[in-house]
């Protein structure tokens, strides 16, 4: 009985000191997480972990507009607008900047880090910031006739992002602002723009003034991500995945509620939870940000369609930047040819700026350079900018501790030079 009592006391102490998280959920150093966070001046409560993007923007003191855009194929997309900075007054005109997130994410990627958020930095620098949300994400999961619980709703790939989502969003923003748009795309957000740009070269060049590529992707055959070893087996698993999930799944594999339980409160839990995305995008804890990492875990992930993943894997396996492959008979019905059509990058008319990272396993140097050389000379920049940190990986474009100094200040400089 005595030992049972002692075990109970010990269990209670472990729970109170280690497992119980208290009120304060973020700390300035990883070491602070081991302390009594509610009594530690280096720790505080950040409510952004479970807030929506509009509430995060408002909580950080920025003006907000919410706009709905309907695509030609019926998807209803939400765009968030930050028309001016926190301390500035509404001017007559500000250059519109449209920021598009990457694969399995949403616009929270650019507002969830307080002063380190790209959207807030650009708004304070004098830009009219628009935040896109791709179809299927939590902010763009409505349709004029389909419900997001139906498989038909998820029958899309990155092709539809480029052919339907971006034309609708660019047309709407240009109509509202009466200006050409600067487009900042990250990862799959860049692929969508390339698909848009080569499918509608004349329209896109009239709407988009300049295109900044963050981890630009069109070709994937050079990827060094460990997941490449699983890609050949995906086509076998896809029917079962579709049967179980209805054609979609959460990119972080765990729900936000399970992530909140699994990945907190200790630094060892935070670091273990980073392993899957590091295996995907580049292994390094060097840029892990103790103060914003807990928020990133819960805000950056979102739903993806299994067909979108299939399309990316097809691009990897084929080594070609091409449409979705429906198989020999399916391609003949869809495209009137046995092979899926290539996206002809020589048709691109929008001037570009390239930024890549040395430790990015998803978008490698070889693939970025091949994409760069596939573009017409008149739209290529003079150089490919490489982030000045050998450990900077694919996720660091939105989560790195030093992302402002290493990346976002460079983006601001490029924009200012462009507008001079």
Image (tube, grey):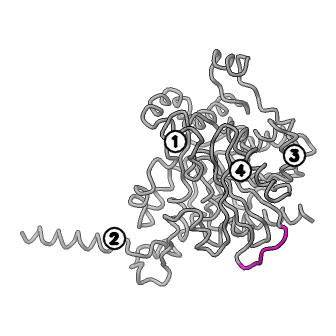
Residue drawn where x is 43% and y is 63% of the image? 268
Q: Give, as a single range, the part of the protein colored magenta.
A: 87-93
Q: Earlier in the sequence, mark 2 or mark 3?
A: 2
- Mark 2–mark 3 CB contact (< 8 Å): no
- Which disc, if any, is residue 205? 3
Magenta-highlighted stretch: main secondary structure? loop
Asked whether 176 falls inside the magenta stretch, the response is no
Measured in 3D between alpha carbons, the distance from the residue under mark 2 to the one under mark 3, in whole angstroms, is: 54 Å
Measured in 3D between alpha carbons, the distance from the residue under mark 1 to the one under mark 3, in whole angstroms, is: 33 Å
Nearer the viewer's eye, disc 2 or disc 1?
1
Task: Say what secondary structure mark 4 lies in.
Answer: loop
From the viewer's perspective, is 127 left or right of 157? right
- Which disc, if any, is residue 148? 1
Q: Position of residue 111 (x, y in %)?
A: 63, 64
Answer above or below: position of 344 versus 115.
above
Q: Nearest the camera: 95 or 213?
A: 95
Q: Residue furthest left?
A: 1
Residue marked by disc 2: 20
Residue drawn where x is 70% and y is 39% of the image? 72
Task: Say what secondary structure mark 3 lies in.
Answer: helix
Nearer the viewer's eye, disc 2 or disc 3?
3
Q: Earlier in the sequence, mark 2 or mark 4?
A: 2
Task: Say what secondary structure mark 1 lies in.
Answer: loop
Residue drawn where x is 63% and y is 42% of the image? 75
Crowding around mark 2 (Cα neighbors within 10 Å: few <14, some 14 to 19, many 20+) is: some
Nearer the viewer's eye, disc 1 or disc 4?
1
């Amino acid at each position: 009985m005595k030992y049972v009592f002692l075990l109970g006391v010990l269990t209670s102490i472990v729970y109170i000191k280690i497992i119980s998280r208290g009120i304060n959920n973020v700390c300035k150093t990883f070491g602070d997480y081991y302390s009594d966070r509610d009594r530690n001046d280096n720790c505080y409560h950040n409510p952004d972990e479970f807030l929506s993007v509009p509430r995060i923007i408002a909580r950080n003191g920025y003006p907000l507009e919410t706009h709905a855009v309907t695509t030609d194929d019926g998807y209803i997309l939400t765009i968030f607008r930050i028309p001016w900075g926190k301390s500035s007054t509404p001017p007559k005109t500000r250059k519109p900047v449209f920021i598009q997130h990457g694969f399995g994410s949403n616009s929270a990627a650019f507002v969830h880090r307080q002063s380190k958020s790209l959207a807030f930095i650009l708004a304070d620098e004098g830009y009219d910031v628009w935040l896109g949300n791709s179809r299927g994400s939590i902010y763009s999961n409505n349709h004029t006739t389909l419900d997001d619980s139906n498989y038909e709703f998820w029958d899309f790939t990155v092709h539809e992002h480029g052919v339907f989502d971006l034309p609708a969003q660019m047309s709407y923003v240009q109509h509202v602002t009466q200006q050409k748009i600067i487009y900042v795309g990250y990862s799959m957000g860049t692929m969508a723009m390339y698909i848009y740009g080569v499918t509608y070269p004349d329209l896109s060049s009239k709407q988009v003034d300049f295109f900044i590529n963050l981890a630009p992707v069109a070709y994937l055959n050079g990827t060094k991500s460990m997941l490449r070893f699983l890609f050949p087996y995906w086509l076998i698993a896809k029917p079962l995945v579709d049967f179980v999930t209805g054609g979609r799944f959460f990119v972080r594999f765990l729900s936000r509620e399970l992530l909140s339980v699994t990945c907190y409160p200790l630094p060892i839990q935070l670091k273990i939870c980073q392993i899957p995305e590091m295996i995907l995008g580049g292994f390094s804890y060097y840029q892990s940000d103790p103060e914003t990492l807990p928020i990133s875990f819960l805000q950056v992930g979102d739903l993806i369609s299994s067909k979108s993943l299939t399309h990316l894997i097809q691009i990897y396996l084929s080594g070609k930047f091409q449409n979705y492959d429906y198989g020999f008979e399916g391609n003949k019905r869809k495209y009137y040819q046995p092979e899926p059509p290539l996206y002809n990058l020589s048709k691109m008319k929008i001037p570009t700026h390239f930024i890549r990272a040395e430790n990015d396993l998803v978008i490698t140097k070889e693939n970025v350079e091949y994409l760069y050389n596939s573009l017409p000379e008149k739209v290529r920049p003079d150089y490919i900018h490489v982030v000045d940190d050998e450990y900077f990986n694919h996720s660091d474009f939105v989560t790195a501790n030093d992302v402002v100094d290493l990346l976002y200040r460079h983006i601001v400089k490029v924009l200012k030079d462009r507008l001079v």
